[in-house]
Image: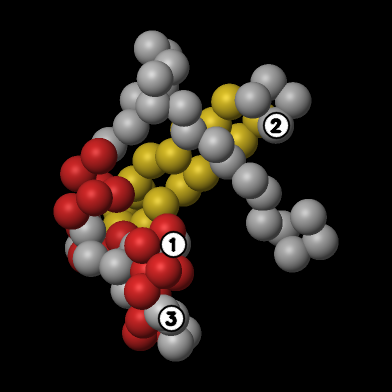
Amino acid sequence: MEAQIYPLAIYLDDKDAIFNRKFFYKTPNRLEERISADEILLKCLKLIDVNDFRPNHHLTLVMDDEKGRAVAYLEKDEE
C-alpha cells in the first residue's frame, strides 16, 4: 500500500460486472518493452498502453475498497 498499488479483482461471472474484453484482450502487451520477461510472466502479466486502444486518452480508476466497487473509464487528454 505504501507504493499506492491496490489490488483489484474482477469477477467476470458477477452479473453486475461490466468488463471491456476488447480493451484487455486485443490491445498489445507492452511488458517486454519495459522489463526482461520470460514466457511464463508474459502469459500472466500484461502492460497496456492506453494510446494503443484509444489515442490521446488516459485511464481513470475510482475505487471504494470498503464497498468493494470500482469503475475505470477512458478520458481524453487535455491539449
Say which quarter of the image contains residue 72: top left
Choose top left, top right, bottom left or bottom right for residue 56: bottom left
Crowding at dot 3, Cα within 10 Å, few <14 / some 14-19 / many 20+, comes out as few
- Residue, disc 1: 45
Give whichever of discs 2 and 1 has the lower sequence position. Answer: 1
Q: Nearer the viewer, residue 31 or 44?
A: 44
Task: Measure how far apart labels 2 and 1 are at the Cα level.
Answer: 23 Å
Q: Calculate the distance from the C-alpha at mark 3 to the C-alpha at mark 1.
A: 10 Å
Amino acid type for the residue under numbered disc 1: Leu
Image height check: is 21 above or below 18?
below
Q: Nearer the viewer, mark 2 or mark 3?
A: 3
Q: Which residue is mark 3?
A: 37
Q: Please report contact status of discs 2 and 3: CB closer than 8 Å, yes or no.
A: no
Which label lies toward us, 2 or 1?
1
- Give how far across and how far down residue 37 sits, in percent: 43, 81
Q: Split into 4 quadrants, where in the image is the C terminus?
A: bottom left
Mark 1 lies on a secondary structure that is loop
**Percent coordinates x, y for residue 44 in the rendering:** 42, 59
Q: The residue under label 3 is which amino acid type? A: Ala
Q: Are marks 3 and 1 in contact (CB under 8 Å)?
A: yes
Residue identified by numbered label 2: 65
Mark 1: few/some/many CA within 10 Å (<14, 14-19, 20+): few
